[in-house]
Amino acid sequence: MSRLVRRQRTAPYEITIGGETQYICACGLSANLPFCDGSHDMAEGEPPDKLCWYDEELERHEANEPYAGIRSDTAG
């Protein structure tokens, strides 16, 4: 399933429970949600002023529609 994800964080969130450290996904791309599986590496290089989405093959695409409150530029 493809989805648009608005990220508030730029890195996984570290938590420690019972002496075990885990990382919570911040990109929404992990196949092991809510935990990080390193999928955020593919989001490296996303233009900061563009909204990107990922298809089922995890290919990056730029969104062409305006999504109020998610990106600051205007649709072309």
Image: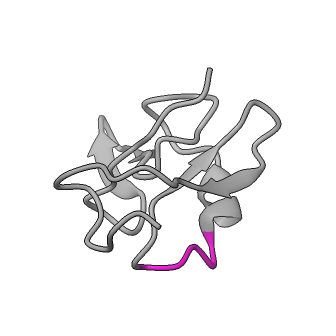
Would you say residue 38 sits in the magenta stretch? no
Note whether 36 is above or below 48 in the view shown: above
Residue 46 magenta-highlighted = yes
Percent across and percent down for residue 49 are 40, 78
Residues in magenta, as a range: 44-48
Q: Nearer the viewer, residue 38 or 67?
A: 67
* 68 or 29: nearer the viewer: 68
Rendered residue at 25%/59% (across/down) = 8
Q: Residue at x 57, y 42 (%)?
A: 29
Indicate the position of residue 48 as horizontal and vertical percent values. Answer: 43, 79
Instruction: Look at the picture and state if 40 lies above or below 4.
Output: below
Q: Is residue 37 above or below residue 40?
A: above
Considering every residue shown, the one lying at the far right of the view is: 57
Outermost front residue: 76
Q: Nearer the viewer, residue 46 or 13?
A: 46
Kindly give the residue lying farthest to the left in the view shown.
Answer: 69
The kind of secondary structure the magenta stretch mainly shows is loop
Residue 74 location, quadrant: bottom left
Quadrant, the N terminus: top right
Using the image, determine if residue 26 lies above or below residue 71: above
Q: Position of residue 14 (x, y in %)?
A: 35, 56
Side of 36 where 73 appears, left or right = left
